[in-house]
Structure formats: C-alpha cells, structure tokens
Image: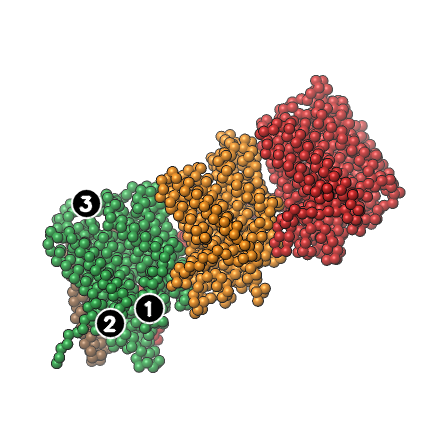
Chain colours: A green, B brown, C orange, D red
Amino acid sequence: MTFDSPSIDYAALSPIIALTAGLVVLVLVAVFDSIKRFGSPIALLTLAVTAGCLIWQWDTNTDLVAGSLHFDGITVTLSLLCVVSAAVAVLLSIGDPAEKQTGRSDYLALLMGSVLGMVMLTQANNIITFFVALELLSIPLYALCATNLRKRDSLESGLKYLIIGSVGSATLLYGLALIYGTSGAMEFPQIAAGYLGDGTPDSINKLVGDPLTLVGIGMVTVGLAFKVSIAPFHQWTPDVYQGAPTPITAFMAVATKAAVFAIFIRFFLVALIGMVDGWDVMLAALAAFSMVVGNVGALAQTSLKRMLGYSGIAQAGYMLCGVIVATQDGISALVFYLAAYVAMNLAAFAVLVAHERRTGFSDDISSLRGLGRSKPLLAWPLTIAMLALAGLPPTAGFIGKLYLIEALVDADWTWLGVMIAIGTMISLVYYLRVVAAVWMSPEAEASPTDEIDTSGLPPAVAGGSAGDFTDGQAHRRWYLVLPAVIGAAATIFFGVVPQPLVEFAQQAGNALSAYIS
Amino acid sequence: MDIEWYLVLSALLFTIGFTGVLIRRNPVVILLCLELMLSAGALAMLAFSRMLGDQDGQVMVLIVLVVAACEVVVGLGIVVAMFRRRLPLDVDDMKELKG
Amino acid sequence: MLSLIIWIPLVAGLIAAMAPQRFAAWIAGSGAVATLALVVVVLIGFDPGGGMQYVTDVTWIPGLGVDYNLGIDGLSIFLVLLTAVAWVPAIAFTASRGTERPGLYFLMLLAGETATLGAFLSQDLLLFVLFFDLMIVPFYFLFGIFGNDREGVTASSATLKMIVFTLIGSLLMLVGAIALAVISADGGALTFNMAELTARGLPSGSQNWIFWLFAAAFLVKMPAFPLHGWMPDAYRAAPLPALAVFSAVLSKVGAYGFLRVVLPMMPDATELFQTTMLILGLASIIYGSVMAFTKTDLRLILGFSSIAQLGFITAGIFALNTSGGEGALLQMINHGVIVVPAFLIVALIAERFGSEDIQGMGGLAKKAPVFAVVFLIVTMATLAIPGSPNFIGEFFIVNGLFQTNVAIAIIATSGMAFSAFYALRMYQRTMHNPLPDGADSREISVRDGLVIVPMVLITVVLAFCPQLIIHGSEPAVDTVVALSNVEAAK
Amino acid sequence: MSAATWGWLVLLFPLLGSLLIGFSFRKIPPKVAGAVGIGAIFLAFLCGIGALIAVQGEPSESRHVASSLWEYASVGGFTIDLGIYVDPLSVFMVLVITGVSTLIHVYSYSYMQSDEGYHRFFSYLNFFVFSMLLLVLAGNFALLIVGWAFVGFASYALISYWYRRETATKAGMKAFVINVIGDIGLVLAAILIFRELGVVDYAAVFEKAPEVFSTNQWEVVAICLLLLVGAFAKSAQMPFHTWLADAMEGPTPVSALIHAATMVTAGVYLVARAHPLFELAPTAADLAAWVGVGTLLVAGTIAIVVTDLKRIIAFSTMSQIGYMFVAVGIGAYSAGMFHLMTHAFFKALLFMAAGSIISAMANRQNIDHMKGFGKAMPFTAVMLIIGALALSGFPGTSGWFSKDEIIDFASFRGGMYEVMAVGMLIGAFLTAIYSFRIIFRILPGKPCDEAQYLIDNGHVVHGEPGNPATGELEDTEVGYPGEEHHIAEQAPGMKIGMAVLGFLALVGGLLQIPGVDEVITKFLEPSFEDSIFVNSHPTVAEAWTGLGSGALISIVGIFTAWLLYVKKPGIPSRLEQRLQPVHSLLVNKWYFDEIIDFLIVNPVKAFGRFSNEIFERYVINGLTSGTVGVIRSAGGAVRDLQSGMLRGYAVLMLFGVVGLLLYFLIRSI
C-alpha cells in the first residue's frame, strides 16, 4: 500500500513552528549557566517572529493538519493578542523575584509553552486539539503561579489553581466525550452536521432535545466558563490573581481570556450552532450573574490585584454577551472589547508591578496614595487604565462597551445591554476609588507585607538568588514603564480613533461568515 | 453489553472522583481523585468510540492519559515545594488568600 | 471652524500643563480668549433663519455608524457663546488667586470647556453622548483634587457621589441612544445623525422607555428635584471658580439635551409625558426655592436657586409652544450669565468673612459701596426683577405655560415670589445689618472688579434689549417645538 | 417739539441725575450732589409743563401720542416695545409727581444735611422718580410692570436706607416681597390680556376690549381682579397694607415722597388708566370701591389710637387712598385724580412738618412725649395746622373740595353707592378727629423739656442715637441722620418746601370749584372720553349741598377732637380702660400682621424647615446612601463567600454544574 506523506502547509503552521522552536531553544539555554541571562531576549525574539508570521498569514483561511486546526481571522486576531500579552508578561518579569528563584529561562520556557497552547487553542477545530491545547495552556500556568517559592501565597495559589483547574478540565473532558458520542464526529463542522441528523426537523429536535447532548453541552460550558472565570465558577480567580506573581497574573488575566473566548466562539458558533436557542439563554444567565457578582464583589476589595480579579469576572461577563448574540457583529464587538481589555489591563498591571517592586509587595489600594503627586509617569497610565475599565468616553473601553451594547440591541438582547450599563454603573465606584486614591488623597507610607521567614530554609532551588525584593528605582525601569505608557497610549488612541481596531475586530467577525449571519 | 452500562460506570467513576475531591483534605489524595475523574471521561470516550466504530475516541484516550500524567507531575511538584517550605499539607489550612 | 472652537481649549490646556507653571495661567487665559474670539466670528457670520450652519461631517467610526458631525444653529449659538464667555472670568479669577499645581488645574478646566463646546456643537447622537460623559471627568478631578474637605464629607467622596450619579444617567442615555438608532434603522443603515434620526421617527411604543432613559440623564445633570442628591455635597466641596462655570454651563447641557434630542426625536412620548415633566419642573421650582431660603451656606443658596431656575426652564421646554421654548432658551442664557459673577462674589465674601455661612455675616456695604452695588445688580437679576432679562425669560415661560396648563402657570409664578425672598435674604444677610467684629469689609479690588463687572454688564445690556437673543434663536426653537407637538405634525 | 419727545426728556433727566450722583459719589461734595438731584427733577418738571403745552395744543380728540424707541422683546406674536403713551392723564400725573418731588428734594437737601450716605440718598431718590415716571408714561402693560418693579425696588432701597438697622432691613424686605406679589398679579393680568386680545399696548387693548368682551365676562373680571391685586399691593389697600406701617423706618422725606405723594397713588393711576376694562367688569370696579371704603374706615380707626407720629400720618394716607379707590371704582375719575393731587400736597406737608418736629424731639416719634411745640416752633406749627385742616376737609381748603366731590358723586349714583357715601362721611369724621388729635396733643400746653430747651437756647437737643420705633440704643454709625438735626425754623430748604406746599394745600381746591371752573375735569376729559360716566355727574346744586355737609362734619370732628384732647384730657384714657378689647384690637392694627403671618409666612417657613431637615436628609440622601448600602452589603456577601477554602470552591462548582444540568434536563423534557 502506498504511503504518501501528508501535505503540510508550512506557511499557515509557521506561528506554531516558530513558537515551538523558541520553546526548545529556551529550554536548552536554561541548561548553560553562562547564557542564562539571554532568556528574555530570546523569548521576546520568538514572540516577535510569531507575531510576524501571524501578520504574514493575515487573511489565510484554511484547514490545517487534516482538519484538526482551522486558521482564519479569529485565529490571527486573538493569537496576536495572546502574543502581545505574553511579550508584556516577559518584559514585566525581568527582575521579578519569582523569575530569579526558578532561574530565568525555565520560567520563560513555561510561559512560551502556555502561549503555544493558546495559539493552538485559537486554531483548534476538533475535540482532541481543543482538549490538548487547553491543557497545554493551563498546566504551565499552574506551575508558573507557584514559581515565587519565597511567598506562601504563590504556592497556595498554584495548588488551588491546579486542583480547581483539573476539576474543570475533567468536567470539560466528560462533556466532550458526550458530545462526541451523540454527534458521532470529532471535527466541529462534522459535529454540527451530525446534530442536523438527516435534515428533517423532527430528527433535529430529537437530537437537540436528547438529554445526553444537553448534559454534554452543559459540562463543556462549565469547563470553559471556569477557564474564563464566569460567575458560579469564578471563585478561584481572586485568590489566584492575588497569590500569583504579578506578571503571571497580568498574562493570565488577559491572554487566557483571549484564547478561551476564541474556542468559545468556534465551539459554540460552529459546532453547536444548530441548538443556539438551547444554550444562549443559559449563557446569558451566566453572563448576567457574573456581571453582578464581579462588580459587586470588587466593591468590597482593598487589594488592587483582587479588585482587578473581580473586575476580570465582570468584564468576562460583558464579553460573553458577544458570543450569546451569535452574529458577526457580536464576534467583532467581542474581539474589539478583548483588544481594549488587553491594552487597559496591561497598563494597569505594569504600573502595579512597578509600584510593588518599589514599595515591597504591598498591593493595597491605600498604598497607592499620593502617586499622582510623586510619580506622575506611573499615575497617568493607571488613571487612564481605570477610566477605560470604567468605560469613560475618551478611552477604548467606552467604544468597546458601545460596540457590545449596539450588537446586543441589534439582536434583540436589549435587557443584557441594560445589564451591562448597570454593571458599569456599579463598577464606577471601585475604579474611581483607585483614581481618587492616586490623585486626591495625601501621601501614605507603604505598609510592609507579610514575608515567610526564609532564615531556616535552604537556599532557593536551582540557583535562584535570594537577594532582597525591593528595587528602589523600579519606577524608572524602562521595561516596566514602557508597557504601561504604551498600554495607556493605545487605550486613548483607540478611544479617539477606533476605526483601525474596528477593522481588526471585523477581520475576526466575518471569519465565520459561512456559519452565522 | 450495550453502551448504557459503560456510560453508567463512567458517570459513577466521575461522581466518586468529584466527591473524593470534596471530602479529602490531603492534596495528594485530591490529585488521585482528579486522575479518577479524568479516567471517567476517557472511559466514556472509549465507549462511544466502540459504539461509533471509529478510532478517534481511542486516539483521544491516549492523549488524555498523557495530559493526566502532566497534571499529576505539576501537582506533586507543587506539593513537594510546599512540603519543603514546611507549610501544612492540608487543604483547609491553605486559607491565606481569601475575601 | 467648529472643530477649531472645540479643540483650542484642550490644546491650550495641554500646553499649560506642560509649560513651566508660571506661564500656565497666561496660556490658559489666551486659549479661552482665542476660543471666545472664534465664537464671536461665528456669531457675526450666523444667519438666524439659516438652520444648520458651519457643518463639518467626517465619518469617524463607519463600523458603528458614528460620524464626527458638527453644526451650529439657533439653539446652540448662544449657549456656545455663553460657554466661551463664562470660562474667561473663571480662569482670570483662578489666575489672580493662584493655586498649587496650576498646570493640572487649567488642563482640567479647559478640558471641561472642550467637552461642553463639543456637546453643544455635535449633531451626531453618539458624539453628543460621548461629550456628555466627557464633560464630568475633568470636573471630577477639579472638584476632587482642588476641592476642600468639609466636616464629615471629604472632597473625593463628595465628587465620587457626583460622578457616579451623573454617569448612571449618561450610561442609561448611552443605551437609549443606541436603542433609538437601532430601532429607527430597523434593518436599514445604522446612523446616529440627529437630523436623520428626527426624520426617521420611532414607533411610539419604544419611544416611551427611551424617553425616560434620556430624561434620567438630563434631569440628573440639571439637577432637577428628585435627582439632586449629589448637589449639596459637590457644591460644598468644589473650588468656587470651577463651580461657577460648572453651575452656569453644564446644567444647561441637560436642558439643551431636551430641546435638541428628546423633543424632535420622541414627539409622541414628549406629548404623553408632558404633564409629568411639567410637574417635575414645578416640584424643582418649589423645592429649590424653599430649600434656598432655609439654607445658611451661600453656596447652597445659589445651588438650590439654580435648581429652581432650572425647574422654570424645564417647565418652559415642556410647555411645548414657541413662547415656552423661547423663554426657556433665553432663561438658560440669563441664568448662565448671572451665576458666574454670583459665585465669584461668594468667593470674595468668603475671603472677607472667612466663612461661607451667612449667620455670622452682615454690614459689608459700609466700606464697600461699589461691591454692594455690583452684588445688588446680581441679586436683582437672580430674583428676575421685571426690567432684568431674567424676567423676560420667566415672563415668556409663564406665558407659554399659561397656554398649556393654567394651574401650573399660576403655581410657577409663586416661584417668582420665593425667588424674591431668598435672593434678598442672601443680599441682606451679607451686605446689610451691623458688621460683626473680626470681619474686614474692604472694597472690591480693581483686579476682581475687572473679572466680575464685564459679566454683570452683559446682563445690564441684555436688560435693555433681550431681543438680541430672541431674534437669533426663535426660528430654531420654532422648528423644534413644531416637531414636538404631534397633532400639528400629523 | 412733540409731546412724545417731551415725554422721553421727562424720563431722561431723573435717570441721568441718579446715575451722575451715583457714579461720582467720591468726587463731588454732598452739597453739589443735592443740587444736581434737585436740578434733575426740576428739569423734569419743566419738560412736564412742555408736554402739557404740547398736549393741550393738539385738538381735543387726538390728545394722546404713543411713540416707541425699539422692539424690546417679541416671541411668537407677543411683541413688547419700549414705548411711552403721553395723554392728559399721564401728563397730569407727571406734573404732580415732578412738582411734589422737587419740593421734597429741596426739603431733604437740608433735612439730610449731615447724613454720611447723602449721595446714595439722592441717587436712590432720583431713581425712584425716574421709575415712577416710567410707570406713569409706560405705553404698554409689560413696560408698566417694569416701571412697577423699579418703583418697588426703589422703595425697598429707600426704606432700608439706614441699612445697618435690623428693623429697617426687615421692613424693606416685607415691602419688597409684597410688592413682588403685586408684580405677579400684573404679570398674570398681562398674560391673560395677551391671550384674550393678542395685544398689549394701551391704545390697542382699550380699543379691542369692548368688541371682544361682554360685560362681566369672567376673563375681563379676572384681568381686572389681577390688576387690582397689583394696585392694592402698591397702594397699601386692605389685604396688602401691612408693609406701609413698617415702611416708616425710612427717613421722613422718603415717607413724604413715596408713602404719601407718589408711589401709593400708582394703584389709583392704574385703575384710572385701565378704566375701559374696569367698566366692562363692574363687579371688579365695585370690589375696588368696597375695599376702598373698608380700608379708609379701618385705617381711620387705627390712626386714632396709634401713638407714633409718622404711623398716624401713614394710616391717614391709607384711608385717603381708600377715598381715591372709591372714586375711581365708582367712575369719578377726575374727582379721584383731583383728590390725588390735593392729597399729595397736604400729606407731604404733614410729613415734612412731622419731620422737623421729630428732629426737634431728637429722633423720638412718640406723641405722648411731645407737648407745647406751638411756641417752640411757630412756623412748623402753622404748617402742621394748614395740613391738618386740609386733611380733615375744613371748608375752603383743597381737601374739602376734593374729598366732598367724591362723596357727592357717590351719593349722586345712589343705590349701594349711597352706603359708600355714608361710610365716607364717617371716615371724614374720623379723619377730622385724628388729624386734630395730633394738633391738640403736640402744639398747645406746657412745652415738654425738648421744646423748652429749644425755646431757651434756640437749638435742638441732642439725645444719644436710638432706633425711633423701638427706642433701643444703636451705635452712631447705624445711619442716624447725623449729629445736628434740622428743624424748619433753622433750615431754609425745609422752610421753602413746606411753605410752597402749605400754599398749594390751601389754594389747591380752587381749581375744581363745582359750577365755577372744573379745570381738572375739563383737562382730563380727553383721557376718559370713552368712559360711560363721562357726562354723568351731579348738578352744581347737589355738589354745593354735599360740600356744605362735608364742611359741617369736619367742624364737628374738630370740635370733638378739641373736646377730647384739650378740654377733658382724661376722657381718652378712661375710654381706653372701658373699651379695652376694642382698644387693643386697634392698637395691634386689627391683627392683620398676625393673620398674614399665621396664614402664609409661618406655614411656608415650616415647610422650609420640614424639607430641609427631614425630606432632604431622609428621602434624597436616603435614596442615594440606601442604594449604595445595598450594593456594599452585597459586596460583603460575595467577599464572605470567598472563604479561601479550596473545598468550598469545589462545592460551589458542583452546585454550578448541577444547576446547569438541571436546567438542561428541564429544557429537554
């Protein structure tokens, strides 16, 4: 029997190839002490190359690897977002205590692994790649969360994230199994075809109504909802965000949402499009619930990272509306909002990292007092980020909310639009409380944080130096201030001239023109 | 044996795993229970693959085993790190992050 | 040309923020004066009957159907003039008093001017909503950073309450605006162009709830009776020059919003809720006046008197006839012109007495006759003494109300009697009665005089001939009012 | 020059005078300021005469001229233009106002000599005359309201002229608020006129009114009632009169000018000017008359009991204005105007005389302390007597002619107007009593120590400065009219003013001798030719019999006053004990102040306190802090849910999964 090698479309696979290459090089570099210092530049280089490949493949729309990956507009846009947030995470973690303890390149290798998982997830087109990519994305993050061995919180957050994450993945797996069983196929388009049955309306109802399918969809929703921290499954988010080292929190908050929403779109709007009125009300309920829980929860927070965690839950609720609407406008609104969300959050986290380094790990809002007067270069990006998150006009946040509400109202989901408005109203209080702390209150002395007494412990594992953690000049470090300023500038720029970002988002929107109107 | 029995078994496995995670306090045992839940999913996948007659399900099961292994590795890694830090290996004592 | 008017203040503000602090005041002042000059040029070239003029229409976000569409007509020409005129004394007064961090102060003040001018000039609904939101942000910083903490209420918590209140309104308006555009497009091309939306019309069912979304935003902004919870704390916390401009101009955007958006685009709903809005306006008049003459803090007296005046304006707008509408527009400008010097005078009084509570005041007129006469003219205009332009505004509002609902008109006139009482009480408790020891009643300085007297002169000139404003704005008000009463349209 | 240009000039000079004095208060010395003030008003008087000649020059049927400068405001068909309307009625009023004002300016030139607010006084006085002239010359109802309000403002400014005195500022506030209520009446009337007739100018309104309205149609009655509200507020008639008594806080020339001659007559002018409307609404006209009668009786009774000199004269003004309202109410317009003129003369004279006596009494106004000024101040005494004679309608004096003409007209009309005539006669009797109560209490008898001091060393005693009404002491800066006071005997200005007025009070009546020369009626006839009463007035015989009865009543009144206060001084005090309740009723001015406070002022203040303490705190703030509280507690709940316990999260996750599955199972059935 003749054995013909499969035709591999290297061009479309180039982003994944570049990332894998980078990952391998990083792992090798980690071995030799002398060149360990070059970890970050290599990581940045790989990310740059990947971004280049993605942009090179801007408008390809093909199936890859025998249908298991599908490279199209959604992939390009959302992968770019993941790559950008990864780059910023790398920049932020230069000189981060966690990175020092685990040795620079290993830390970055794990990060690269996670990014690879994300890029694959945005392309996943069948159940197997879906599950593998999701796990490839999560497992390095579990590890990364626990890297700051010095701090007890970091270990605790890592373990919590792992256990709850695995429960979510297990549920997801079981759901996928059920869907595979009832639809009879692995690739999403075939699943959709499978659910259509022989096209006769009653067969559709039978299949759609069949309990196993619905249970399957339910469990898959739980798995994905957990990953993107939608309401009832959000409990891990605040703890992990607070515990994990801040660059990782930044990366996790932004990149995971982008990747998981990619698979949300592909899975729900390609595979399960047949039973849209089955799951859209359920998702709407989840979205509304998470908006309320996220916004209300954030009110009572004093730690900035926990507050950003809760705000992440609320923003995830807003973004989910893009999927519920099941229209191209909905997807482009979602992608636009994600892009704005990336810019806002990275600016906020960059400032937070710089502030933490300078004041020794106190992420309490009251420690931000008087920042406006003493460090305007840090204060302005944080203020712009907060105003953008609150959805005030000159920023991309406002245009994002506007685009989302317009998509909702267009598809007769007006009550969700009002829910977004109400959620934003509540969110004003805690976002502006940060702005008030930065600008309007007098200078505050930084409160020292709890630190494990590392006296009795052996030196850090794998050669991590046990130097002290505060870096007085943190606020002037280029790699900390640059992402903050760029993030804030991007927020304002896309707030005033949103058209390029709208086109970027529409690229993703009309990628699914074949499946939805 | 038609497929219902396999599904019932996998559902049973899943619930046992889930309750194990809820009840036990030692992280290592929790990791074990997670393995159980993953294997329940794998079993269901196998059953359906057998019913549908194609090998996709079995390929998936192999991959699931690999992934489960990775998780356990990372999980145990963290548990060891915590043990070295002389932190109490009890899930209920991990209450630092709350509120 | 209009874009120039909108963006010059912001540019001047940015330069003032960057430049060395010594020149900040001069740059800011020149920015404001330049805008004023441009507005005067536009005013000269303005032809009252000519509908929308100086139109600039550039597509901004084609994806969302939003375009950068500016235009000026009878409705907005004089409000734009009021804005440009009001900012100059505010900046001059702050410059003469000096603040710490002047660069930031002037940046925020001028950003406020940009947003307000934008709101008055934008002919695209989304652009209007955007500028409407943008207006409150600079004042949030101004009141928060430069405001003064009072017992029990810190400046930042008072301003937080203000901005949350206002933004709740404007968020509801955002949803309303999108719903309005989407429903009126029903499948066709989505646009936010106000003229287009007015032409398309809206099914009356959806008009009703959209009406209340818009009304909520504008009533909070004014502030009107039930939704003025934020006003006392914010007014007590704010720095006075910024407050003068805030109270004079920003509350007018709310009233202007009714005329520009609600009346033409939702005629059925306006017709349906006319009486409720009249009663709301009336409640503001009565409640505002009653509170004004019980309060003892000068800022709150002026604040609640503005609520009463805005109540008059709302009633005028919802009389839905030319006389009511024109009276309301005239009253908006009169109130704006008189409130700026009023607040600056309160600042001068506070400097002389050390506090703003009128119980400890009196007898200032003894050694400050010129100051007393200026304040007398301001008080007389505030209580709308016949002969002042404010009276002509109130006269035509009551005349308009008379044609729709006689009972409400008569109760509204009681507002005139109350205003006489509280304005005179304010004047007497500060100027007359014996001078308490420890207060120095020195004459108004030439510098302050140069800042305050020009605005008072505008009122005096308008007193002789209010027709200047009426002539310019009547055709535009006619079109809006004609659109709003549905039977005439049918 | 045409009458219109004269009209504009009449308006121009007082305004110029007021601004000139106002702006140059630091540069020109007080003397020059006084001179400028007097000059401005005198020029206005000359222009008034010019207008008189111009108007008389016109043929009789076209003796009214309307001219407007520019269009003041026009919205949706409602056009108001800045116009004046010159006709015999307005010229007559201009002459009375400017004439009397010039004399009062001369009087106050020396009376206010050492007061440190001299410039401010003359500036306000000139502004007052300007606004009064604007009111009288206004060509349409809107401009009338503007004049009306300026007059109100000027009276406020002059009442609280000594602004450092608490009682003065309170009185000023009270006068101004009641005046604003009057303005509101006029505003509503103007709006109603526009709604019915579509036009606001006098000529057009009075020409269109008969076509549109039928007599006693509710609209025209409403318009007239609203006009009456304005008139009563300005002329201090029954329900709105409480401010007049307190207005005596102002300096005496102010009381002379505003609360005797000019401002209080504005209401009478308004009713006369709008007579076509009132004739279409007889019920309103009768109401005006009845209120007039009521006021004159009430005021008369109070004047008998009040002990403050200026307040007695104030209440007498109220009752004389009552007479004028009856006159214009029943259609005797020219009689009303004539009484208005004569009243201006003798009432101003009385106030001036009272002023010089009060100065002599070192600013104390209680007549119980005043005794024996006849010898101490002969000139003032004579003037006082002339004024009292004219006021009580002693035969031969101007008061006699003017008051009795009204009474004759009332009795001529018969029916219920007969009852009014009787009321007026009783009023005349009361007037005679209280006017001579002043004379007999102050002039005869042993001079009190101030008078004695004046007789001995020829100049006035200087008590320490005190509030004349309440008597409690004040610091000298309060605006006390300077150290030296001025009595007519020593101040030339006061003497000239009083002398001329005294002459006019005596001689004024000859202008209108029934049967001989009805100068006023013939002069005003063109203004009232469209009135239905124009050619119906009592025959000459009836007029003279009326005059006879009037003379008789005034003599009897004077005799009883003489009896009570000179012959048997004990009677009044005994009467007071026996009729104690009546006495206290009258002393408290029939408790009007208390009634108004009870009905209007206190409820409004209570409503203010209620809304301030309770409503604002609980409802408005409750609303906001309530919602914030709810949200914050929800936030707390979410935070407590976050127990940090890993197993807790897993449980919630389980609930989430179960919830979803249940939802789907339910859907799938």
Quadrant of res C473: bottom right
Q: Position of residue A419 (x, y in %)?
A: 40, 61
First in sequence: mark 2 or mark 3?
A: 2
- Residue A434 placement, left or right of B7: right
For label 2, the SS is: strand
Q: Position of residue A229 (x, y in %)?
A: 29, 61
The quarter of the rendered structure image containing the N terminus of chain A is bottom left
User: Considering depth in this image, is C338 or D327 the residue closer to the camera?
Assistant: C338
Give the class, few, some or many, for how many residues have Cα within 10 Å of label 3's Cα (few <14, many ≥20).
few
Position above or below: D308 against D190:
above
Residue furthest to the top in view is D457
- Residue A165 placement, left or right of D606: left
Chain letter for the residue marked with disc 3 in the picture: A
How much space separates mark 3 and mark 1, taking CA atoms? 51 Å
First in sequence: mark 1 or mark 2?
A: 2
Kindly identify the residue that appears in the image at 72 percent across and 45 percent down.
D86
Residue furthest to the right in view is D541
User: Considering depth in this image, is A214 or A305 the residue closer to the camera?
Assistant: A305
Q: Amino acid at mark 3?
A: Asp
Of marks 3 and 1, the one in the foreground: 1
For label 3, the SS is: loop
Q: Position of residue B40 (x, y in %)?
A: 21, 70
Q: Which mark is residue A510?
A: 1
Q: Which residue is mark 2?
A: A63
How much space separates mark 2 and mark 3, taking CA atoms? 51 Å
Q: Amino acid at mark 2?
A: Asp
Chain letter for the residue marked with disc 2 in the picture: A
Q: Which residue is mark 3?
A: A468
- Residue D491 placement, left or right of D549: left
Quadrant of res D518: top right
